[in-house]
Image (spheres, coloured by chain):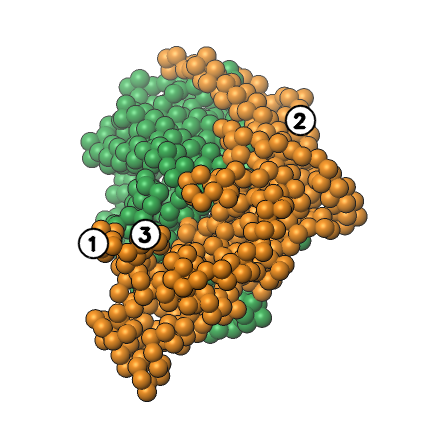
Chain colours: A green, B orange
């Protein structure tokens, strides 16, 4: 196979997948690409399991009363497992661990992350955390809700609480080490010419994310340790019966978990910036605004945790302050949406699967962000807090946005990662099923919540049943879409057409190396330009991909 | 500063609340019926935010779809050159949302101050939350016999709330109020409603209108069963009702005691004890009286198998007779635990007096005269027909 890279990479048949063989070459690999692929597989497997629990929960909710096949205790365990798996095993590690690991060094023009061994260690920490969670499940499960609120979590009789809390503790370290690795990589491994403002926006987003991972996650760690200490040794920290304070736990928990929602969404926003620009074949609008809004979000995200506690009895003054600051996080998010919109203007928009996911993201994130507003508004949140309105809101932002971005990113980089093209036809159908199913499943939950249906309810008032049935149908439709997506992606691995180096016409560095990339990414230092200047690309019919036109006028850096 | 504001608004609110009567707002697409004095304010803020949201949603998604169609790639050769930035536009779409957000904040803030400052003259009801039921105690010392919340119309009501175990939260959607109940602290919540719930004094529950009161903070197994109805009564009727709560059992004579009072009191036990043999958090009452009085099932194990009903109950044993045993189980539930249940039942000391316990025991003895929900259906009905 010959390559068309301007970096002059020698023709070679070896890529990172075939570079060495055997199971050990994967288990002990230090190659960021292989680690990324291992993360991808693990995260998707967890997503499958978490999804099954979601289907159990939704199926129960078809009827308002008690059912014979699942009782209240089992139901509580099912939604707890669903939430904990999806948050800690799927969404938080998904984009940084899987896609970030794969593309960050290549986009930067580096051969690997700064600390490849630490990177592998992060992965094994993830595995350890996952195993502990499985153990917790076998040891008797846990029914605390993903938020582990005390004193329920320190007093419930389910035996899996301590193991799962240990699991989440370990997962936290996995996240911290990944963040640390990315921060150092971006600071230290940029090749000559790769200035901060020539970095693709995904890197800004991953950088902002990494800052939060490093700074916020330790707080989760200590909180969980204190929880374990209280539960195991009866030392009062959160339990008022022993002189503790349950609200303190909520402060600690959200001090991490609000920033954590940006650990989930910022990388997704980064992916969307890439997808929208590349598939519109046009300079991204407002590069600096997008880049700085990522940093602004990272900073503000530390200052709003109290908006999860408006009804907790914290002082009214505190509520007022937190409400005010909450709105300041909304602004940078809105700016990003407007910038993506302006990027579409006068673009040349390819409506392929990856881009459809990009547009779906814009749709869903707009709803998710806007519905954050009545939650940030004090008197309306009093009514909406702990109802399905909140459930719908965070599914729109965590699943509809962060996870959809992840899936869009998988499609965007699939040819790069595995060197094959998937079926666009089935891709579009899958995306449509997921999009429609998602909205049916979760938009109904806004009405449920605003009309007063509390969350985490095994039984409910019959008047809510219609919405619940519709919501469950949406969930089934979504599940179908995901199965289809899994099927055609797997199919493409074996039967897919060979992918060109640059199938979409991207200009950032990963599109300059072959698909799949060689073991060490670049054999010579790549030439760095504006990652969003597509003017010197041309279509190569024989390759079915884009290539650099040597006769094009030299690009000028314009942002 | 904030405290001054808090005080100023609370006084004006207290008076305004009494003099104006706001009609019940009917349920709409988003919000349920609104029946408290603060609900119009909350609904206004909600609608304000929603209308802004509709505007931005239509704008963003409309343009997105329009651009996606108008500028779709035709062929492969097209490279687009749109503007890469536009300072005025960018400033504009930063400043406009900021201004709108300040308004949202302001409406929310004003409404919130009213929500958290109960007027001085509010009528106080003490609420105890326990896994998984509510107990409402009134200033006279009486508690609501059927564990539903009865409040007078036309005056501010303040709930002072306490939890016996874990976090709970009172949520009354029609009043737009919610407040967590944190163990070790008192939580307060106030509301005023000027609207009597129709049919509250009908004997037929089908005809009674009421508002929902939910537990909104996850509290374990029967979180979703921690429910009460809210009835709003005219002041005079409320006073009558309240007077009855203190001595409602006094008027009941003979068998009426367990026939009438039994089902009402059972409301507090229903979240954990079934009447028809169904599994729940605690032992079913079906066959209970037979078990404790030496009949079938009296070999049932207690205290991890160390005891049985038979070994504890009977002349010369720990409990003279089954009545004493049941009474002790209600007042000191942790003393003897039936296998395989956990030690989760709260004590009812101070909540159920001797007469109430008599009523419950009477109900247990005559369980075949009640249906599975605890409704008295009289004798002559066989257990099989239930
Ligand atoms: C425009 C921006 C946003 C605003 C103003 C906003 C506001 C809020 C508020 C006030 C709450 C608390 C509601 C309550 O519990 O009563 C909340 C809950 C939540 N939000 Fe957002 N939010 C925004 C965006 C996001 C994003 C981007 C994410 C994640 C990717 C997110 C994830 C969550 C989660 C996970 C919860 C609730 C978790 C729980 O209680 O279990 N939000 N949001
Ligand atoms: Cu938050």
Q: Name the residue under label 2.
A: B96
Q: Mark 2 lies on which chain?
A: B
Query: From where the camera sits, is residue B68 visible?
Result: yes
Q: Which one is in front in this view, the residue at disc 1 or the one at disc 2?
A: 1
Residue B155: horizontal and vertical position, in percent? Answer: 67, 45
Q: Which one is in front in this view, the residue at disc 2 or the one at disc 3?
A: 3
Q: Is residue B230 above or below residue A332?
A: below
Q: In this view, does A410 lie above or below A557?
A: below
Residue at the location (58% across, 44% down)? B233
Residue at the location (43% across, 67% down)? B357
Residue B196: horizontal and vertical position, in percent? Answer: 57, 39
Residue A520: horizontal and vertical position, in percent? Answer: 37, 43
Q: Mark 3 points at which residue?
A: B377
Disc 2 CB within 8 Å of nearest ligand 1 atom: no
Q: What element carries label 1?
A: helix
Q: Which chain carries label 3?
A: B
Evaluate whether label 1 is on the same chain as label 2. Answer: yes
Evaluate whether label 3 is on the same chain as label 1. Answer: yes
Residue A539: horizontal and vertical position, in percent? Answer: 37, 18
């Amino acid at each position: 196979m010959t390559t068309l890279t301007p970096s002059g990479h020698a023709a070679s048949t070896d890529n990172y997948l075939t570079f060495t063989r055997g199971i050990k070459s994967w288990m002990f690999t230090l190659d960021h690409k292989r680690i990324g692929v291992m993360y991808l597989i693990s995260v998707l497997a967890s997503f499958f399991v978490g999804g099954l629990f979601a289907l159990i929960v939704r199926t129960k909710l078809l009827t308002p009363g008690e059912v014979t096949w699942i009782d209240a205790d089992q139901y509580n365990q099912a939604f707890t497992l669903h939430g904990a798996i999806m948050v800690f095993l799927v969404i938080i590690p998904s984009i940084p661990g899987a896609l970030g690991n794969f593309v960050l060094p290549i986009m930067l023009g580096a051969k690997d992350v700064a600390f490849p061994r630490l990177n592998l260690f992060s992965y094994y920490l993830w595995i350890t955390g996952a195993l502990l969670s499985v153990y917790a499940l076998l040891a008797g499960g846990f029914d605390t809700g993903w938020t582990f609120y005390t004193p329920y979590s320190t007093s419930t009789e389910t035996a899996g609480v301590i193991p799962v809390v240990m699991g989440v503790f370990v997962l936290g370290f996995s996240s911290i080490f990944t963040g640390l690795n990315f921060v150092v990589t971006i600071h230290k491994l940029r090749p000559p010419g790769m200035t901060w403002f020539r970095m693709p926006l995904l890197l800004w987003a991953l950088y902002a994310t990494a800052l939060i991972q490093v700074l916020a996650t330790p707080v989760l760690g200590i909180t969980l340790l204190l929880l374990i200490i209280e539960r195991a040794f009866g030392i009062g920290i959160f339990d008022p019966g022993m002189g503790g304070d349950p609200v303190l736990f909520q402060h600690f928990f959200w001090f991490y978990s609000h920033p954590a929602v940006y650990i989930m969404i910022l990388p997704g926003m980064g992916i969307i910036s890439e997808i929208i620009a590349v598939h519109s074949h046009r300079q991204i609008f407002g590069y600096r605004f997008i880049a700085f809004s990522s940093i602004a979000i990272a900073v503000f995200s530390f200052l709003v945790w109290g908006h999860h506690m408006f009804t907790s009895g914290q002082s009214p003054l505190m509520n007022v302050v937190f409400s005010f600051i909450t709105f300041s996080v909304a602004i940078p998010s809105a700016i990003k949406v407007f910038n993506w919109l302006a990027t579409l203007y006068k673009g040349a928009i390819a409506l392929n699967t990856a881009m459809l996911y990009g547009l779906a993201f814009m749709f869903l994130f707009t709803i998710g962000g806007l519905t954050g507003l009545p939650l940030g508004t004090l008197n309306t949140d009093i009514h909406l807090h702990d109802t399905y309105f909140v459930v719908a809101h965070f599914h729109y932002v965590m699943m509809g946005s962060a996870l959809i971005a992840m899936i869009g990113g998988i499609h965007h980089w699939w040819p790069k990662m595995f060197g094959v093209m998937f079926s666009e036809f089935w891709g579009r159908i899958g995306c449509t099923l997921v999009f429609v199913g998602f909205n049916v499943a979760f938009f109904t939950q806004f009405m449920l919540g605003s009309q007063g249906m509390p969350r985490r309810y095994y039984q409910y008032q019959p008047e809510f049943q219609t919405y619940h049935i519709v919501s469950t149908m949406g969930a089934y439709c979504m599940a179908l879409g995901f199965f289809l997506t899994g099927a055609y992606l797997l199919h493409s691995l074996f039967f897919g057409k060979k992918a060109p180096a640059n199938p979409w016409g991207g200009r950032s560095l990963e599109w300059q190396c072959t698909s799949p990339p060689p073991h060490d990414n670049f054999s010579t230092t790549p030439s760095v330009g504006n990652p969003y200047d597509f003017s010197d690309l041309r279509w190569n019919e024989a390759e079915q991909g884009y290539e650099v036109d040597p006769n094009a006028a030299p690009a000028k850096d314009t942002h | 500063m904030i405290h001054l504001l808090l005080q100023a608004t609370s006084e004006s609110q207290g008076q305004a609340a009494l003099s104006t009567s706001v009609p019940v707002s009917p349920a709409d697409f988003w919000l349920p019926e609104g029946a408290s004095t603060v609900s119009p304010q909350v609904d206004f803020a909600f609608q304000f935010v929603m209308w802004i949201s509709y505007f931005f949603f239509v704008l963003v998604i409309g343009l997105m779809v329009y651009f996606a169609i108008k500028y779709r790639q035709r062929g492969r050769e097209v490279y687009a050159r749109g503007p890469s930035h536009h300072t005025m536009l960018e400033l504009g779409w930063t400043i406009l949302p900021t201004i709108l957000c300040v308004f949202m904040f302001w409406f929310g803030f004003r409404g919130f101050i009213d929500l958290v400052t109960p007027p001085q003259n509010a009528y106080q009801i003490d609420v105890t939350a326990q896994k998984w039921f509510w107990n409402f105690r009134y200033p006279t010392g009486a508690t609501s016999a059927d564990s539903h919340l009865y409040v007078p119309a036309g005056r501010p009501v303040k709930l002072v709330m306490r939890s016996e175990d874990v976090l709970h939260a009172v949520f009354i959607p029609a009043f737009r109020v919610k407040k967590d109940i944190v163990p070790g602290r008192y939580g307060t919540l106030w509301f005023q409603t000027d609207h009597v719930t129709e049919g509250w004094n009908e004997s037929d529950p089908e005809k009674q209108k009421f508002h929902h009161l939910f537990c909104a903070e996850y509290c374990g197994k029967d979180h979703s069963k921690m429910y009460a109805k809210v009835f709003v009564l005219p002041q005079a009727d409320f006073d009558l009702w309240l007077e009855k709560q203190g001595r409602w059992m006094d008027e009941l004579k003979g068998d009426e005691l367990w026939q009438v009072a039994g089902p009402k009191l059972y409301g507090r036990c229903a979240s954990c004890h079934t009447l028809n043999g169904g599994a729940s958090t605690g032992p079913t009452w079906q066959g209970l009286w037979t078990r404790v009085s030496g009949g079938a099932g009296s070999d049932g194990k207690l205290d991890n198998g160390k005891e049985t009903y038979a070994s504890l109950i009977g002349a010369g044993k720990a409990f003279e007779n089954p009545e004493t045993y049941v009474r002790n189980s209600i007042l000191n539930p942790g003393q003897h635990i039936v296998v395989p249940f956990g030690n989760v039942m709260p004590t009812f000391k101070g909540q159920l007096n001797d007469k109430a316990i008599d009523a419950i025991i009477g109900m247990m003895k005559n369980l075949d005269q009640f249906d599975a929900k605890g409704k008295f259906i009289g004798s002559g009905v066989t257990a099989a027909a239930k």
